[in-house]
Image (cartoon, rainbow, N blue to C red):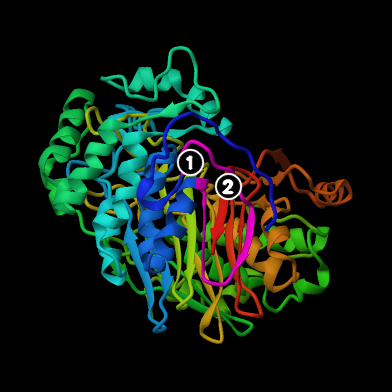
Amino acid sequence: MTGFSFACHSPKKTAVESLNINSFQFSVRKKIICANGAVVSAHPLASKVGVEILRRGGNAIDAAIATQLALAVVYPNAGNIGGGGFMVASLSNHKLLALDYRETAPLHADRDMYLDEKGNVEAGKSINGHFASGVPGTIAGLFASAKYGKLSFDKLIQPAIDLAEKGFALTGREAASFNSIQNDLKQYNTVMPVFVNETGWKAGDTLVQLDLANSLKRIRDAGEKGFYEGETAKLILDEMKRGGGIITPQDLRSYKAKFREPHVFDYKGYKIVGMPMPSSGGILVHQMMKMIEDKNIGAMGFQTSASVQLMAEVERRAFADRAEYMGDADFYKVPEKMLVRDEYLKQRMKDYVAGIAGDSKRIQPGDLPKKESEETTHLNVIDKDGNAVAVTTTLNNSYGNKTVVAGAGFFLNDEMDDFSAKPGVPNLYGAVGGEANAIEPGKRMLSSMTPTVVLRNDKPYLVVGTPGGTTIPTSVFQTLVNILEFNMSTEDAVYKPKFHHQWLPDTLDIEKGFANDVLDSLKKMGYKTIQREGIGRTEAIRVLSDGKFEAVGDIRGDDDAEGY
């Protein structure tokens, strides 16, 4: 075991007594190698809950559910019951799963809802406050996935109830994060939530969330209806009325999670399993991996000017296609098969010139025939039976739309911003879109979430994912290339600096830590580089040659790897 730790101390009693987890004194573990099961997530308490579920007879699906519910309590800036997500899984019987519990546009939504009388996008309207919220899908997703678990749902949700009801100690990062949104909380909430603290939060402070505990109890006792109907639904609807939101009882009652056909492709003998539409992640990773497949990138070396340029250019081309062609395939005919055809991808790279930066004004979405022939959180789980699960969930922006449902205790999402409010106008993450991702009632907004499982000989080899908005697919892509092509250790593959290009804006974002000579070389090629703070927080589990599991949590956050 390696990594660094901090501890939060409080005289309080252990909160999760049923699992022997002390929520007032804990530390972060960045890496663990173990034989029976592993969980890596954005918060040590959530990872510990997941591993204890494995210890007590649950499988990887059970642990993923319990971890998500715990994150809804201990990591409220992205963990949630008011948002949505995706799950990709490889089960021990070789069945592959892709579960979509992405939020949907309310039935009263319309394509021009964020435009003013002159047809211009109103700044902030799709990001902050009640009007920005899509219909939450997380709880429906958890119950849909539970049929592949072994334990009863009440056992999986109880640790989260305990953490909400009895409290837990804040880490330094969490305290600083809460302090940074105090003005937003006061501006966008009609009833002040428990996250408001006039004297400021500090590390070690206890956060108790009784309203959230009661919401979780209603789910425990009444199942999905405990969220989408009854008291919790009434509280959501009351909140909508107070704040001018448009979610209705019918929106809540009619929400359904959907199992979809996983997006699967081969890369040099590995089978890579990703999420299909409305996630762009599966197709983007497919396009990017295939565009480098014949380029012998391994010989170029990690983060040389040659390998970074090649990867940046395939990222540019993939994101140009995203803007034009990708959206909810239930509403728009996405040309998925054409976008990943070998001949199409070879054509996309014909104008690639080594040593010269591309130009996004010239490099447009690919020419297809007209008919078909950054705030999020990720977790990975693997168990001793060979079940591997990758889950990415989100509220979109950090703390979603900054609105807490009064009396219910959870943040609502601002996922409506992931639609294209107007063709060509960038969203919160700078991504542009068009007709494929226009707002329609009941439609699911295009996502960048990229939960990924890599199989070797039809058995799990890697489980990978990250938060980070539009940087998610490029971070997953780079992590896969780091391991599969550059033969890097799991820690280096996760920890080393990342970079990102998304077509528009035509900039190459680079994390601090890049070699200066590589930066200079990229600038000479013609790239406009922007140095920025951390890109994503990648979580990875790798199955080693002896069958043991190596779990790594990113050093960019409180991310934590646990196992036994």
Depth check: give the residue in front, 442 or 359.
442
Instruction: In the rendered view, tell whether residue 295 sits above or below residue 142.
Output: below
Residue drawn at 63 percent across, 46 percent down: 535
The residue under label 2 is: 504
Residues 399 and 56: in front is: 56
Residue 275 place in picture, x, y as percent: 43, 66
Give residue 54's quadrant in the image: bottom left
The secondary structure type at the circle numbered 2 is loop
Residue picked out by circle 1: 426
- Say if 28 sits above or below 492 in the image: above
Image position, residue 372 (x, y; %): 37, 76
Q: Out of 447 and 6, give the one closest to the viewer.
A: 6
Q: Please give left or right for residue 79 compared with residue 290 in the image.
A: left
Question: Do we see residue 363 in this rendering?
Answer: no
Q: Is residue 348 magenta?
A: no
Residue kind at label 2, given as amino acid type: Leu
Q: Is residue 119 visible?
A: yes
Residue at the (52%, 82%) spot, across then down: 459
Cα–Cα span, label 1 and label 2: 9 Å
What is the span of residues highlighted in magenta in the rendered image? 22-44
Q: Which mark is residue 341?
A: none
Q: Pointer 1 and pointer 2: residues touching (CB < 8 Å)?
A: yes
Q: Is residue 554 above or below residue 283?
A: above
Q: Residue at x 37, y 67 (%)?
A: 58
- Within 10 Å of disc 1 (Cα), the crowding (few <14, some 14-19, many 20+) is some
Q: Is residue 412 left or right of residue 532?
A: left
Q: Residues within 10 Å of mark 2 (few under 14, many from 20)?
A: some
Q: Is residue 31 magenta?
A: yes
Which label's residue is closer to the chain start, 1 or 2?
A: 1
- Which residue is painted at 20% across and 29% down in the image? 239
